[in-house]
Image (spheres, rainbow, N blue to C red):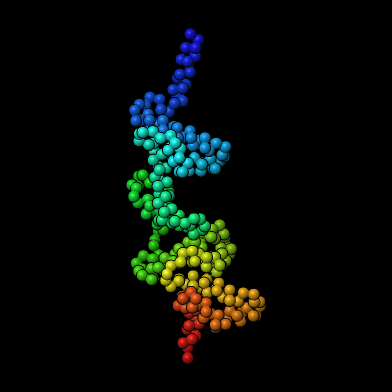
C-alpha cells in the first residue's frame, strides 16, 4: 500500500518533467527526438562556461550529429531540420572553395555572394542564420563589363581584405595599416584577376618590387636605387602596371616629353 501511495505521488512529478507527456503518434515521436537530441547536446557541452556554452549548443555540426544519433522515423524537429540545412550549405560552400586552410580559404568561406548562391535553393523561411549575411548596399562595379569590371572587382575584394586585416585599429594606426605596401600586396595577390591591376594593387606591387631590387641598401644609396630607371622599368613591366601605378605612369609621361 505504501509503495502504491509513493508511486501515485511521484507520477504527477514525472509527467510534469516529461515535455512530451500528452502527445501521441508522429507528434510524440518528433517531441521525443528533440528531447533526446537536446540531452545529447547538453552532454556534449558539459563543463563549458559562459559564451563558450552558447557557441557549443548552437554549433550546427554538433546538433546535426546528435539529431542523427537519435533519429526517429517522423518529421524532424525544427532544430534538427535547421542544422541539416546549415550543414548542407556549409558543404556547398566548401565544395566551391575547395581549399585546405589559410587566409584565402577563410575569405572564400565568408564570401557573401558564394553563401547566397548556396542558400538560394532553400525557401527564405527555411534558411538558417548562415544565410542572413550582410550584403553590400551598392555594387561599386555595377554597369561595368569585361576587363574594366574585373579590375573593379579586384579592387573591391582587395579593399575588403585590407579592411579585415586592419580591423580593430584606430586613428593614424589605421591609415598606416591600410597604406602599408606589404599588406596591400598580400591582399591583391590573394584576390588576383587576369587583368590590369587597380591602382592600389599596381602601386603596392611596384613598391614591393622596388624594395626587393634595393634590398640591403642604406641612406642616400636607397633613394638613388629607387630612382634608377632600369629598376622602375623592370618593376612596372613585371606587373603590367605601366598605366595603373603612379610611379609607372609618371615615368611613362616623362618618357614621351620631348
**In front: 213, or 241?**
213
- Is 229 drawn above or below residue 188 in the view shown? below
27 or 200, which is in the foreground? 27
Q: Position of residue 236 (x, y in %)?
A: 50, 77
Q: Quadrant of residue 207?
A: bottom right
**Viewer-closest of 213 and 185:** 213
User: Residue 76 location in percent, x, y?
Assistant: 37, 36
Residue 36: name its quadrant. Answer: top left
Instruction: Give the residue displayed 65% in from the left and 80% down from the top.
Output: 220
Q: Is residue 87 left or right of residue 220?
A: left
Q: Is residue 49 above or below residue 113?
A: above
The x, y position of residue 88, in whole percent, is 40, 47
Locate residue 166: give its quadrant: bottom right
Of all residues, the one furthest to the bottom in this rendering is 258
**Residue farthest toward the top in the current orientation of the protein:** 1
**In the image, residue 228 lies at what x, y percent?**
57, 82
Judged left or right of residue 225, residue 62 is left
Q: Residue furthest right?
A: 219
* Residue at left offset 56%, top offset 63%: 174
Residue at image coords 37%, 26%: 23
Identify the residue shown where x is 64% and y is 77%.
217
Q: Is residue 131 visible?
A: no
**From this viewpoint, is residue 194 visible?**
yes
Amino acid at each position: 500500500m505504501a509503495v502504491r501511495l509513493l508511486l501515485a505521488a511521484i507520477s504527477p512529478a514525472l509527467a510534469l518533467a516529461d515535455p512530451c507527456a500528452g502527445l501521441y503518434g508522429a507528434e510524440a515521436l518528433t517531441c521525443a527526438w528533440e528531447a533526446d537530441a537536446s540531452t545529447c547536446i547538453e552532454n556534449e557541452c558539459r563543463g563549458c562556461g559562459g559564451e563558450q556554452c552558447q557557441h557549443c549548443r548552437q554549433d550546427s555540426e554538433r546538433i546535426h550529429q546528435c539529431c542523427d544519433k537519435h533519429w526517429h522515423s517522423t518529421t524532424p524537429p525544427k532544430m534538427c531540420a535547421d542544422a541539416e540545412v546549415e550543414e548542407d550549405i556549409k558543404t556547398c560552400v566548401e565544395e566551391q572553395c575547395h581549399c585546405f586552410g589559410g587566409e584565402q580559404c577563410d575569405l572564400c568561406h565568408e564570401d557573401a555572394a558564394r553563401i547566397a548562391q548556396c542558400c538560394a535553393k532553400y525557401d527564405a523561411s527555411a534558411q538558417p542564420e548562415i544565410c542572413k549575411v550582410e550584403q553590400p548596399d551598392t555594387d561599386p562595379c555595377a554597369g561595368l563589363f569585361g576587363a574594366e569590371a574585373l579590375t573593379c572587382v579586384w579592387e573591391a575584394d582587395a579593399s575588403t581584405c585590407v579592411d579585415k586585416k586592419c580591423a580593430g585599429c584606430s586613428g593614424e594606426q589605421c591609415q598606416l595599416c591600410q597604406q602599408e605596401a606589404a599588406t596591400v600586396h598580400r591582399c591583391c595577390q590573394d584576390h588576383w584577376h587576369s587583368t590590369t591591376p587597380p591602382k592600389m594593387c599596381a602601386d603596392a606591387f611596384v613598391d614591393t618590387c622596388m624594395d626587393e631590387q634595393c634590398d640591403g641598401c642604406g641612406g642616400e644609396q636607397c633613394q638613388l636605387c629607387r630612382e634608377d630607371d632600369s629598376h622602375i622599368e623592370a618593376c612596372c613591366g613585371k606587373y603590367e602596371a605601366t598605366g595603373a601605378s603612379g610611379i609607372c605612369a609618371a615615368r611613362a609621361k616623362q618618357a614621351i616629353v620631348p
